[in-house]
Each structure stands twice: as C-alpha cells, then as structure tokens.
C-alpha cells in the first residue's frame, strides 16, 4: 500500500494531468483512456472501462477500456444492461459479472461502477474491476473513482459542446457558401476573414487571394464620379450610425470587368462602441443598372425618333396647305413624298416598338414556309439601289440553285432590310454592299457585308442590345432607335438560328446569320432512298 501523502500526491497529479489533457486536446477517446487508466491504477484495480449512453437513453456502450480489448466488449452487454437499468441488485450484477468473467476467462472478481453526471443527469459510467477475491472496494476507493468520473463527465461534455459548435460552424459555412449573394465577413480592421463562392464569381478574386486583405481593395465600390467610396466614405465608418449601412456603385473585377453592386453591411460594436467586425451582403445589380440606363436611353431616343418625323410632316403639311401660297406641281409632289416617307418611318418605328413589346411578352409568332432567299434579297437590293446614292454598288453572291430556307418570309425580309439599310446608313463613303450565302449541313448561312465605318470590338456585342447605338459622330448624324439589330437577332433566334457580326473599324462590317433549310431540300437519306416502296 502507498504512504498516504504519496498516494494523495499521485491522485492530485493524475487529476491535474487529466484536466490538462482535457484542455489541451479535444480527442475524447484519448482523455477517457487516461481517466480509466489512472482510476484503475489509483484504486489498485486490474481492469476498467468507461461506457456512455449512446443513441437511446438506456443503452450503455463501452467507449474506452483498460486491459479489456474491443473484441471482448460484446460479452459485457448483459452486465451493461443491468447497470443501465439503475435498479440492479448486488446479486443481479454479481451474477452478470460472474458470467462475463467465465465467458472471457478473466479474473473479474470485484466491481465498482459510478455514474458520470452532467448537471445531475447520468451520461455514462466508469467501472473498475479487481482480480483479487478478498479485497473489496472501500468507500475511499469509491470517492476516488468519483473524482475521476466527474473529470470524464467534463471531458464528454466538452467534446459534445465542441462537436456541436463545429457542426454549427459547418452549417453556417455551408449556408454562407451556398448563398446566391456574395457574403464576406470583415474583422475589426476591415480585413476579409470569410469570402464565399458567389463573391469569387462576382469580384474575380479567389478566396485565397482575398482573405486577409482590406475590403476596400477587393470590393472597391466606385461612385458616379469614379471615387472609391470604400476608401473615402466607408459605409461602416459613416456617422451617425445606422443599423445596416449600404453602398452601391461600380466595381472593376480582378479580370477587368465592370459590374454594378449593392452592398449591405451588418456591423457589430463592442461595449465601448468600438467596431468589432461586419458581415457584408453583396448583390450584383448590373442587370438592373443596365435596364435603368436603357430606360433612360429609350425615353430620349424614342422621343427624338418620334418627334422628328412628326415635326417634318407637320412642317410640310402646314407649308403646303398655306392659303396664301400656291405651289407648282413638282413642289407639291416632292412635299407629299416627304410626308409619305416620314409617315412610313413613323409606321416602321411603331411596328418595331410593338415587336419589342411582343418579344418581351413572350415571343414572336412565326408563319413558317419555304423562302427563296436569292429572290427576296434581289427584290430588296433593287429597291435600295433605286434610292441609295451612286456611290453604292450592290452585289448578290448566292450560288446557283440555293435551296429554300424554312422561315417566316415577312420577318426575314425585315432582317435583311435592316441589315441592308444599316450597310448603307453606316457607309458614308459608299462602297460595295454584298449579300450572299452558302449551305452547311442542314442550315443556310447568309451574310450582308459593307465597306463602311465598321464597329469597334467593344461595341460588337452591344449593337444587338435594345436601344444601343454606337456613340460616334455618324451615330449622331444618322437616324435610328437602336432597335433594328435587337429585333433582327430575336427573329433569327426564334428560327433557331444565330446572328453575329465580324468587323474591322474603318474597313467595314459583315453580319452573318443562320437559318434552317427547308426539310424537303435536304439531301435524301441514301438508306431511305434504297427502301422499296
Ligand atoms: P439603328 O441603326 O436604328 O441605330 P440598329 O440596331 O440597327 O439600330 O444598329 C445599332 C447600332 O449598331 C447602330 O446605331 C450603329 O452604331 C451600329 N451598326 C449597325 N449596323 C452597322 C454597320 N453595318 N456598320 C457600322 N455600324 C453599324
């Protein structure tokens, strides 16, 4: 037996080691392993285990053991059931203990089991066995094991809390990660500590690059005057404070794209009102911004486009109708022709506007049938050649026996008329305007090319947008609402085709679109042709 002081010293030493282990590592198995090992040693036992209530409240399962191997755990099941019931008599548990000992061939003669309690509720048991028959566990032994039991309970509690915290953290991370909005979390010095996938997509910064950087660098929101608001007027530093400050403006992504964003912040402040950090919720509002810009352009372009012909018509009608003036026939005819042309323009513009709203309301209706493109373009170019200046030459470049396409003739006429009139409109020096086509598989490719001003690469996609007109001197001189190409593309796409442009500024443009060929004109399938009728 130990000298008492030595014994107490060791007990204290062991308990200290366990509590160090509890705070140093979150590996529950390792801590429980130490608890059971020290408990067994201090009470001069030979075997022991810690069993925990897992799943159901009344089922104890061995978590760790000392001198008992995992393959022997199953033999303890009946004993554990008796212990778990809490109402077992000494005889009952003695009998079960004897049975286990027999089955495993282990000298389990004496047993002491104590509950692990968290706030008075049992979460498991620590059980220690002795091999010696005559040396029963004393009250002192039980008190000692009890001290270890409460250490084990603390360890289990800690591990469970930690696990719950980790799970909660993972759940939050998953929510943040999957959020469709950009989410970033800032620390007290405005540095980014969390940066979700949507933020990566929005800003072009990878998470690795963004973490640790000041938010003003990664999400520098610029106002209309191109000033970085985040640097000069950080929404999180504005006074007076509001619960959810916001900022809206333009950002330039890491890869040089421009986007409009709206950012909303939820800051937290400490007891001395010091800034502790914030969550920023960032939304891409580019589409809305463009829509607003388009609306503004729409109003100015349309009112200009509507007003001009109306003013001309009114002017001519007023002049021709003046009671105090007499006009010769030629002047009258010219005047009436201008009125008619301007009325046609108005009519066309109104038609285009109606088509735009039809498109927005759910698509265009097509009346499909075989369309002879070479004949259609010949008619159109003849009409144009009659009105365009002599500086233009129109060339048709369709191979002989060009097959019919499967299309809505009236709509395709609109597409070609628009491409051709643009070719003339945007070629101030005149030149050759070519229209031609070829077939590829089951589709026809049709092009209209000119030798005009061309389109700068940055405008080549935008010219297909609603109301978009290239802002140059020619654009300001020519009339147009920026609807022609938007409608042309929509019509071609409604046919299942595509419309694109190739252009070199100063040298000319080539618009190319595809249309499906009329089925009958497709090559006959040789297998089918061979089938006897
Ligand atoms: P609109 O001609 O009424 O302005 P469109 O949608 O037909 O509208 O064309 C949009 C813009 O694309 C034009 O304003 C013009 O700047 C440019 N564009 C169209 N066709 C040509 C072309 N063939 N050559 C050069 N620029 C063109």
Image: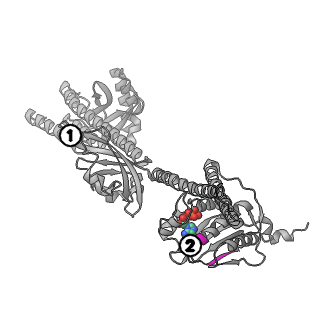
Q: Is mark 2 within 8 Å of ligand 1?
A: no
Q: Report helix, strand or loop for mark 1.
A: helix
Disc 1 crowd rating (10 Å Cα; few below 14, some 14-19, many 20+) is many
Which residue is rendered at x = 34% and y = 34% of the image? 51
Q: 292 or 135, which lies in front? A: 292
**Does residue 176 appear to the left or right of 370 in the view shown?**
left
Q: Disc number at residue 3? A: none
The residue beneath circle 1 is 18
Task: Establish if 135 lies above or below 276.
Answer: above
In this rendering, does residue 131 appear at all?
Answer: no
- Rendered location of residue 458, percent (x, y): 47, 67
Which residue is rendered at x = 28% and y = 24% of the image? 120
Which residue is rendered at x = 72% and y = 55% of the image? 366
What residue span does the magenta drawing correspond to?
423-437
Quadrant location of the C terminus in the rendered image: bottom right
Which residue is rendered at x = 39% and y = 53% of the image? 199
Rendered image quadrant of residue 36: top left
Q: What's the CA distance linking mark 2 and mark 1? A: 76 Å
Please state the quadrant of the image where ligand 1 appears: bottom right
- Rendered location of residue 15, percent (x, y): 18, 37
Task: Establish if 143 lies above or below 285.
Answer: above
The residue beneath circle 2 is 502
Rendered image quadrant of residue 143: top left
Disc 2 crowd rating (10 Å Cα; few below 14, some 14-19, many 20+) is some
- Mark 2 or mark 1, whichever is nearer to me: 2
């Amino acid at each position: 037996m130990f000298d008492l002081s030595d014994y107490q010293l060791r007990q204290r030493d062991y308990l200290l080691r366990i509590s160090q282990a509890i705070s140093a590592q979150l590996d529950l198995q390792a801590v429980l392993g130490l608890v059971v090992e020290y408990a067994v040693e201090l009470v001069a036992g030979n075997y022991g285990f810690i069993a925990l209530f897992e799943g159901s409240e009344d089922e104890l399962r061995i978590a760790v053991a000392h001198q008992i191997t995992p393959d022997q755990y199953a033999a303890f099941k009946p004993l554990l059931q008796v212990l778990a019931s809490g109402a077992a008599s000494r005889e009952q548990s003695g009998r079960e203990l004897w049975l286990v000992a027999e089955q495993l061939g282990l000298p389990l003669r004496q047993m002491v089991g104590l509950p692990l309690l968290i706030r008075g509720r049992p979460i498991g048991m620590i059980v220690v066995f002795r091999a010696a028959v005559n040396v029963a566990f004393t009250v002192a032994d039980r008190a000692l094991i009890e001290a270890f039991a409460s250490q084990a309970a603390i360890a289990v509690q800690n591990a469970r809390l930690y696990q719950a915290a980790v799970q909660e953290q993972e759940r939050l991370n998953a929510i943040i990660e999957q959020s469709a909005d950009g989410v970033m979390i800032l620390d007290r010095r405005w540095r980014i500590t969390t940066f979700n996938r949507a933020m990566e997509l929005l800003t072009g910064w990878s998470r690795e690059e963004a973490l640790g950087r000041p938010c003003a660098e990664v999400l520098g929101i610029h106002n209309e005057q191109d000033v970085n608001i985040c640097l000069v007027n950080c929404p999180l530093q504005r006074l007076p404070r509001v619960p959810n400050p916001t900022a809206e403006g333009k950002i330039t992504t890491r890869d040089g794209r421009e986007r409009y964003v709206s950012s909303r912040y939820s800051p937290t402040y400490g007891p001395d009102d010091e800034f502790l950090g914030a969550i920023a919720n960032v939304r891409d509002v580019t589409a809305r911004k463009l829509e607003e810009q388009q609306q503004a352009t729409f109003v100015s372009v349309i009112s200009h486009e509507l007003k001009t012909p109306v003013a001309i018509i009114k002017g001519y009608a007023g002049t021709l109708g003046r009671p105090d003036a007499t006009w010769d026939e030629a002047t009258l005819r010219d005047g009436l022709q201008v009125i008619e042309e301007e009325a046609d323009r108005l009519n066309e513009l109104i038609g285009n506007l109606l088509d735009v709203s039809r498109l927005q309301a759910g698509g265009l209706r097509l009346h499909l049938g075989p369309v002879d493109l070479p004949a259609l373009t010949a008619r159109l170019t003849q009409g144009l050649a009659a009105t365009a200046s002599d500086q233009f030459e129109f060339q048709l470049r369709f191979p002989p026996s060009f097959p019919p396409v499967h299309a809505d003739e009236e709509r395709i006429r609109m597409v070609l008329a628009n491409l051709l009139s643009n070719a003339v409109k945007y070629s101030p020096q005149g030149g050759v305007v070519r229209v031609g086509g070829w077939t590829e598989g089951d589709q026809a490719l049709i092009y209209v090319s000119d030798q005009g001003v061309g389109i700068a690469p940055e405008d080549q996609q935008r010219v297909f947008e609603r109301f978009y007109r290239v802002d140059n001197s020619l654009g300001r001189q020519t009339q147009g609402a920026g609807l022609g190409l938007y409608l042309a593309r929509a019509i071609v796409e409604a046919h299942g085709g595509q419309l694109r442009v190739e252009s070199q500024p100063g040298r000319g443009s080539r618009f190319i679109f595809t249309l499906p060929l009329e089925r009958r004109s497709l090559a006959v399938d040789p297998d089918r042709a061979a089938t006897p009728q």
